[in-house]
């Protein structure tokens, strides 16, 4: 097994953590008992040679023949883990650019391919599956792999292995040069579309859809039968998928690009297996986080899951209705029926069905959420985290917002909520909670005027003054006592002085003290955009800074350009230097590409009225876009989409 191992200059080769001098010893340990130590060594080799992928290191081609000898030896306890590493490396080599691949890999793989093909006849079905999966994802042409795959197909009787073979046959037949057996392989796979075994039909659709993208739609009923059938569990034993029901649902849903809700609606139909029902809601979330139009088709099925016997299912259904918010308001009564449902979900500790119902009613602006939110403010246990959590990517992550994210949606009920918010603001020890509650009162604006006396008192406490100042500035109601307290803080310097100066102005103060602090901070600092946002509130009083603001409209940072354009326009009415940076910020939005800076840019353009007609023309098609306008995943995808669309609607109306 180790012939040639000591002749390799391992110290001269490189893996993910530097010199590969440690590889020879680890490879030897993979073959020695006890089994747990061999497995540990194999996992260490996997980490060194693959880690997170992205390249093929120089140690990989040198290690490849020894990895395959380990995988082929029946007494090696970690042979499946070693073969998994070979599969990962082969798949990565087929995807990374040539510059990220050691030149020795291609000849090493060509020499190793016969050994991989030989594993298709191994007595252990787990090894046969791993070999098929390796061949499915490698870059070897079909003419080199199809004869062995076809030979194995005709003798294989293990269903999980046959599924891996179908994927390998289909993918190999599409890799050029495919050779003389390609037509035979494709005919075999096409013939499986009518096979009595539903999982074989699913595997066939998966590989044939690459060259026939309409096939999944034609085979929709067969796909639903496959993912709903108990036999779907066999995929967990394959090497290619290794997932249970939820994983296969996700894999199959990927066959339907775009906004098609037909497959997901079929998944949502009643099913006896809780994992299936949970997975169906997960796929509904994946679809809805990207597209708006499926909501109408899926809403009834989502609402039907609110009385499911499994708490995780009820939670996910309520959470998705919360994401859809106002468009799901017709189901508010059913959601309100869950307010006393204290059953905890299984996928995320601390969250209950009642929490999700409370969040959904807040999104629907339904007053039945108020008692529960007031109880949370008073310290009642809940699953709402102390701070906002953001999720990137295209995925939906079912989870609750921070409490303040729910409260900020309810300015219509500020009169009821203000006392409880002020009580919590005054006693909270977590600054994240204080800051969140300040954002709530600021967002409610004049509707939260009743909070002003309490907030003025909090200005005298070092722990709470900044939160109180933020809230008071947003409320914007003149108050002499608060102004006096804030004026004394404008001399402290830094961000505290900027906040105090801005709040002082917002509460009816003179422009001089605010300009003295905000002018230099907005035009001379390294990170001026927070101060620029505040300076814009001073309008024409900031005209003396116009020259420096004009220079900032061409800054390298998009946030600075947008905030400077807003401040310059507010100070001077200048559109010659402000329109273009704002247009540049929102231009990608016309194609559905979203960045956080676009929302303030659109809102500033709206303030310009008819002068912003070029922007209105540019974004005129945005309201009709079906794809969600979002900066990330999870619930924020829905709320960001709503905020940006509302801002675009306002712009189109103002510029008309």
Image (spheres, rainbow, N blue to C red):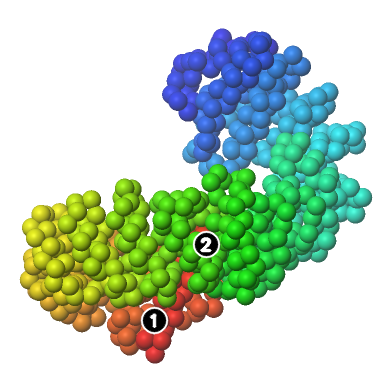
* Camera-side residue of 31 and 533: 533
Query: How dense is the environment of label 1, judged by Cα within 10 Å: few (below 14), some, or many (20 and up)?
Result: many
Horizontal arrangement in the rendering, residue 403 relative to residue 118 (left or right): left
Residue 27: image location, x then y, percent: 60, 16
Quarter-of-image position of residue 353: bottom right
The answer to whether residue 418 shows anywhere in this view is yes
Q: Position of residue 584 (x, y in %)?
A: 34, 70
Quadrant assignment, res 153:
top right
Dividing the image into 4 quarters, which one contains the N terminus? top right
Q: Nearer the viewer, residue 553 or 634?
A: 634
| Up-down relation of residue 62 to residue 589 (above or below) | above
Establish if 461 lies above or below 239. Answer: below
Q: Residue at x 55, y 44 (%)?
A: 349
- Residue 359 image label: 2
Q: Quadrant of the C terminus?
A: bottom left
Residue 637 is at least partly visible in this image: no
Give the structural element (helix, strand or loop) at label 1: helix
Give the mark nearest the N terminus, 2 or 1: 2
- The structure residue drawn at horizontal position 43% and vertical position 24%, both measured from the top left corner, is 18
Disc ID at residue 651: 1
* Residue sticking out furthest to the bottom: 656
Residue 93 in the figure: left or right of residue 165: left
Question: Spatial distance from mark 2 to mark 1, Cα to Cα?
Answer: 30 Å
Instruction: Measuring from the top left, give residue 395's x and y in whole percent.
Output: 56, 54
Q: Are marks 2 and 1 in contact (CB under 8 Å)?
A: no
């Amino acid at each position: 097994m180790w012939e040639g191992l000591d002749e390799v200059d391992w110290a001269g080769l490189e893996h993910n953590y530097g010199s590969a001098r440690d590889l020879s010893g680890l490879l030897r340990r993979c073959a020695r008992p006890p089994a747990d130590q061999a497995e540990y060594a194999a996992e260490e080799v996997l980490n060194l040679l693959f880690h997170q992928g992205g390249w093929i290191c120089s140690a990989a081609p040198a290690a490849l023949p020894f990895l395959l000898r380990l995988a082929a030896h029946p007494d090696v306890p970690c042979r499946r883990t070693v073969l998994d590493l070979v599969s990962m490396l082969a798949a990565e080599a087929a995807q990374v650019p040539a510059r990220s691949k050691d030149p020795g890999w291609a000849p090493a793989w060509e020499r190793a391919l016969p050994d991989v093909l030989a594993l298709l006849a191994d007595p252990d079905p787990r090894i046969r599956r791993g070999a098929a999966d390796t061949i499915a994802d490698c870059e070897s042409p079909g003419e080199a792999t199809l004869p062995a795959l076809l030979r194995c197909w005709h003798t294989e009787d293990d269903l999980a292995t046959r599924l891996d073979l179908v994927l390998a046959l289909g993918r190999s037949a599409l890799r050029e040069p495919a050779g003389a057996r390609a037509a035979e392989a494709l005919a075999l796979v096409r013939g499986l579309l009518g096979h009595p075994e539903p999982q074989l039909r699913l595997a066939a659709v998966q590989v044939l859809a690459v060259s026939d993208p309409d096939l999944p739609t034609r085979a929709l009923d067969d796909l639903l039968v496959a993912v709903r059938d108990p036999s779907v569990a066999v995929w967990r034993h394959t090497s290619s998928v290794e997932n249970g029901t939820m994983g296969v649902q996700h894999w199959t849903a990927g066959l339907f690009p775009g906004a098609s809700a037909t497959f997901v609606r079929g998944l949502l139909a009643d099913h006896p297996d809780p994992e299936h029902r949970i997975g169906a809601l997960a796929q509904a979330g994946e679809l809805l986080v990207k597209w708006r139009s499926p909501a109408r088709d899926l809403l009834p099925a989502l609402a039907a899951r609110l009385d499911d016997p499994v708490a995780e299912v009820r939670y996910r259904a309520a959470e998705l209705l919360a994401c859809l918010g106002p468009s799901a308001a017709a189901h508010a009564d059913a959601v309100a029926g869950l307010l006393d449902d204290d059953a905890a979900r299984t996928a995320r500790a601390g969250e209950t069905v009642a929490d999700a119902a409370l969040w959904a009613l807040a999104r629907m602006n339904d007053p039945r959420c108020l008692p529960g939110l007031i109880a949370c403010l008073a310290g009642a246990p809940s699953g709402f985290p102390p701070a906002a959590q953001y999720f990137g990517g295209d995925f939906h992550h079912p989870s609750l917002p921070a409490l303040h994210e729910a409260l900020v949606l309810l300015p219509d009920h500020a009169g009821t909520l203000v006392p409880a918010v002020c009580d919590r603001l005054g006693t909270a020890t977590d600054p994240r909670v204080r800051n969140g509650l300040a954002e709530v009162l600021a967002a409610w604006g004049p509707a939260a005027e009743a909070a002003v006396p309490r907030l003025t008192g909090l200005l005298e406490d070092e722990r709470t003054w900044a939160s109180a100042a933020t809230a008071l500035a947003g409320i914007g109601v003149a108050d002499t006592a608060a102004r006096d307290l804030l004026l004394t803080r404008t001399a402290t310097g830094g961000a505290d002085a900027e906040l105090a100066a801005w709040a002082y102005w917002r509460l009816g103060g003179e422009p001089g003290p605010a300009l003295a602090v905000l002018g230099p901070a907005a035009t001379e600092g390294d990170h001026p955009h927070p101060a620029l946002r505040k300076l814009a509130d001073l309008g024409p009083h900031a005209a003396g800074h116009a020259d420096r603001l004009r220079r900032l409209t061409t800054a390298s940072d998009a946030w600075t350009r947008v905030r400077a354009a807003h401040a310059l326009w507010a100070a001077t009415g200048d559109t010659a230097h402000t329109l273009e940076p704002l247009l540049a910020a929102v231009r990608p939005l016309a194609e559905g590409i979203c960045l956080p800076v676009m929302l303030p840019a659109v809102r500033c353009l709206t303030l310009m009225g008819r002068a912003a007609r070029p922007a209105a023309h540019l974004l005129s098609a945005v309201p009709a876009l079906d794809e969600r306008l979002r900066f990330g995943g999870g619930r924020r995808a829905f709320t960001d989409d709503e905020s940006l669309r509302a801002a675009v609607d306002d712009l189109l109306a103002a510029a008309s």
